[in-house]
Amino acid sequence: MSAIALAMPGAARRARAIQEPAWVRWSLITLALAFLTLFLFVPLVSVFYEALRRGVEVYFAAIVEADALSAIKLTLITAAIAVPLNLVFGLAAAWAIAKFEFRGKNLLITLIDLPFSVSPVISGLIYVLIFGLQGWLGPWLAEHDIKIIFAAPGIVLATIFITVPFVARELIPLMQAQGTEEEEAAVVLGASGWQTFFRVTLPNIKWGLLYGAILCNARAMGEFGAVSVVSGHIRGLTNTMPLHVEILYNEYNFAAAFAVASLLALLALVTLALKTLVESRTVQEKKERADEHRDT
Amino acid sequence: MSIEIRNLSKQFGTFAALRDVSLEVQSGELLALLGPSGSGKTTLLRVIAGLELPDTGQVLFHGEDSTDQHARDRRVGFVFQHYALFRHMTIFENVAFGLRVRPKNVRPREVQIRERVLELLKLVQLDWLADRYPHQLSGGQRQRIALARALAVEPKMLLLDEPFGALDAKVRKELRSWLRRLHDDMHITSVFVTHDQEEALEVADRVVVMNEGRVEQIGTPDEVYERPASPFVYEFLGHVNLFHGRVHRGRAWIGDIEVEAPEHAEAEEQEAVAYVRPHDIEIERVAGSDAALRARVSHVLSIGPSVRLELILEGGGQRAPIQAEISKDRFRELKLVQGDSVFIRPRRFELFPNRIH
C-alpha cells in the first residue's frame, strides 16, 4: 500500500512535467472535435437524414429503381475487375521493387504514383484521346465495332488507372522492411519459386495486401472525375453510382440522389471499419517484427 | 563433404567483394571465415550456398563443379545472422518446412515429419517451444531453432553467417561451445563467418583470415595467432604494438636492441616494423645486461587477473603509446605507479620490412 501511495504522486509529477497546461490541452481537443463535427460528422449525418426525410418507402424506391440498380451493377462490375487486376499488378510491382535491383526502378516507382499526382479528369481525357472516335485508335476500333469510350470498358480502364497506386504503395514499404532473408532461407531449404511465394512471401504480406485492396475498392467504387469523362452519362448503361447521384441531383430529385449517396456513404463506413480492423492486425504484426529485432 | 573454392571473384558495382579467392574445406571440418566487415567473408559464404553467383571462378563439392547449381539443389544448411525464421509459422512448422516442400514422391509421411522435427527440437533442447511463434523466443533460442531448421533437410554442409553476431556476450559464449560440441557429434562439414577473432580461434579447426576480398592466411588457430603471415593478420588478431627499426643483412635493430633476423638476409638497410603483442613485452625497473628501451609508465589499468600498462618510449620515435600486459603478481613485484621510468624489451616479435605507417 505504502509503495503505491509513494509511487502515485511520483508518476503524476512526471506526467505533469512533460504535459502542457490543462487549458491548452482542452482547447486543442475542443478545436479538433469542432472541426471534425463541422466538416465530417454533420455532412455524413445529413446524407442519411436527407435520404430518409421522405420516408423509408421513397428511400428504397429510389434504390430499386431500374437506372439506380443498373448503376449499382456497373459499379460492382467495375470494382470486381479493377481490384483483382490491381492486386496482381500491385503485388508484382511491389515484389520487383522491394526484392530486386534493376535499372529504371525509380522510374517505375514514379509511374506508380502518377495517378495520384494527375487530376482524375485528365486521366479520363487520356483514354478519350486514345480510344475516342477522334482519338488515335478511334477509327480502327470503330471499324471493328469495338466500343470503349462512352461504354463500360472505358469506365473499367479509367478506374484501373486511377486505382493503380493503392496496393503497390501499401506493399512496397512493407516488403522492403521484410527484406529477402526469409525467401532465401526457403530456397536454401529446397522450396521452389511458387512454394516460396505462397508459403513465405504471401503470408507475410497478407494484411498489407488486404489493406491495399480495401482502399483500392473504396476508390474504385467512389471514383467520379475520370469515370465522368469517359462514361457519356447514358442512363441505365454507362452510369456508375457517383455519376447517378450527380444526375439525380441535377434533376432536383434530392431524395433519390441522397438515397444512392447514402449507399456510397455506407460503403465508406464499412471500408473504415474494415480498415481499422486490418490496421490493428498490421500494427500487431509490426510489433511482432519489432520484438523480433529488439534483441538482435 | 569437401568444398573447394577456385579463383572466385565477385564484383558489386565498383566494389570488389571477392578477388581471386581459393581455398579448400576438408570433409567434416569446422572452418571459420574471419575478417572485418567488407572483407568478403559473407559474400564467399553466400556464393558457396548458391545465394550469390560469382563473376569468375568455381565452387566444387566433393570434386564436382557445382558453380551453376541452383541454391535449392545444393543441400546446404544455411543459418542467417538474423535467423530469418518464418515469422508466421510456429517453431514446429519452421523446422518442418524443408521436409514439407519436397516433391511428393520424396516427401516423408506426416508421422515421419513429426518424428524428425521433434527429434531435432530435442537436439537443440527446445522441444517445449514447438507451438510458439518466433517472436515469442529469445535471440539465442531463435538461433538454435534456425540451426534445427537447417539440419532438418540433412544438409551435406552447414553454412553459418555470423551465427552469434546478434546475441549478447554471455549467450554467445554458451552457444559457441554448444556449436563446437554439436559439430564434434555430427561431423558435418561446416563453415562459419565471424568478425570476432576470439570466436574463430576458440571454435574452428582452421581459420581463414580475409581482408578486402582476399585470403590473407589459412591455418589452425594456433598458426594464425602465433605466426601471422601479414601485418594485417597481426593487427586483426588482438592488439599489437609497432616498433620502428631497420634490418640489414639478417640483423635487425629496434633502438639499441639488436637481434637476428635470418629471414631478412637479403635486406639492405631497410626500414622495418616489429609487431609485438602486449603480453610479449618484458618490463624491468633496472637495466639488465641485455639492451632495452627506456619508457615511462603513462597509464595503469587493472583488468581482472592482469594489468594493462601504457608506456611512452623515451627519446621519441614512437607515435602511439606502447601497450603492455603483465600479470597482477608481476605488477605487485615491480611496484609500478604512473610516471615511473622502466626498461622494456620485446620478448617475441615478427618483423615486416618496408611498411609505412
Image: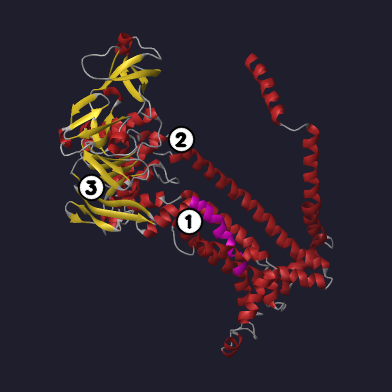
Stretch in magenta: A161-176
Question: Regarding mark 1 in the picture, which secondary structure is present there?
Answer: helix
> Does B280 appear above or below B15?
above
- Badge 1: few (under 14), some or many (20 or more) residues near its Cα, within 10 Å? many
Badge 3: few (under 14), some or many (20 or more) residues near its Cα, within 10 Å?
Answer: some
Which residue is outermost to the bottom? Answer: A143
Q: Amino acid at mark 1?
A: Ala
Chain-order first, disc 1 or disc 2: 1
Q: What label does residue B156 carry, if any?
A: 3
Specify the subunit that label 3 lies on: B
Say what amino acid the circle numbered 2 marks. Answer: Asp
| Image quadrant assignment for residue B148 | top left
| Left-right relation of A190 to A89 | left
Which residue is at the front of the view, B306 or A16?
Answer: B306
Could you say whether the residue bearing mark 3 is in a helix, strand or loop? loop
Q: Which residue is mark 2?
A: A295
Report the residue at 49% width, 38% height from top.
A291
Q: Indicate yes or no whether the magenta region holds residue A175.
A: yes
Please indicate whether residue A34 sits to the left or right of residue B228 in the image. right
Do badges 1 and 2 share one subunit?
Answer: yes
Q: Label 3, label 1: how many angstroms apart (C-alpha)?
A: 32 Å
Q: Which SS class for mark 2?
A: loop
Residue at 82% x, 73% y is A251
